[in-house]
Amino acid sequence: MARTANVFARVEPEVKEQAEQVLDRLGIPMSNAVGMFLRQVVLQRGIPFEMKLPPYDEPIAYGSLTNEQFDAEIEKGMEDIRAGRVYTSDEVEAEMKQEFGI
C-alpha cells in the first residue's frame, strides 16, 4: 500500500455536505477527490480551474471611506453630471435586465 499523508481542511458544513452528495453519486470518496485535486495542482503547476473577479466593481461602502475619499467620490459623480454622463432609472433597469437577467 502506498504511503499517505493527512490533510486537514476547514470548510463550511453546507459546502461539505453538497460536495459529498455529488461525490457519492459519482462513486468517488472525498479523500480520492481531494487527492485528484492536489494531483492536478501539481500537474498544472497551479489551481486547475480559472479564478477571476466578478465582471463588475464592488460598490463602495460609505462607512469605509475617509472624508477625503468620500469627497473625491462625490466629485467624480459631479463630473459625470457636468459631462452629461447621466442615465434614467429606466435605462439602468433595462441594462441590468439585459446584462444580468434581473
Image: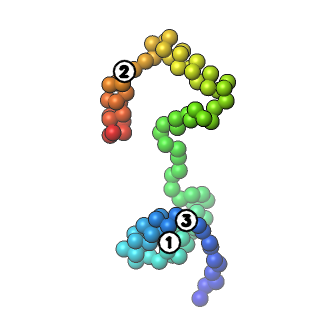
Q: Is residue 21 visible?
A: yes
User: Which residue type does callout 2 highlight?
Assistant: Thr
Mark 3 falls on what kind of element? loop
The residues tagged by marks 1 and 2 sit, at their Cα atoms, a distance apart of 50 Å
Foreground: disc 1 or disc 2 = 2
Mark 2 falls on what kind of element? loop
- Quadrant that contains the C terminus: top left
Q: Nearer the viewer, residue 49 or 86?
A: 86
Mark 1 in CB contact with mark 2 (< 8 angstroms) = no
Q: Which of marks 3 and 1 is nearer the N terminus?
A: 3
Find disc 2 in the rendering and name its residue.
88
14 to the left or right of 100: right
Q: Where is residue 3 in the image (x, y as percent from the top left)?
A: 64, 83
User: Which residue type does callout 1 highlight?
Assistant: Ala
Q: Which of 91 and 25 is in front in this view?
A: 91
**Residue lying farthest top?**
82
Q: Which residue is drawn at 51% across and 52% down?
A: 50
Callout 2: 10 Å neighbours few (<14), some, many (20+)? few
Q: In this view, does 8 lie above or below 48?
A: below
Q: Position of residue 49 (x, y in %)?
A: 51, 56
- Quadrant that contains the N terminus: bottom right
Q: Which of 62 and 58 is in front in this view?
A: 62
Mark 1 falls on what kind of element? helix
Find disc 1 in the rendering and name its residue.
33
Foreground: disc 3 or disc 1 = 3
Q: Residue at x 62, y 21 (%)?
A: 71
Find disc 3 in the rendering and name its residue.
11
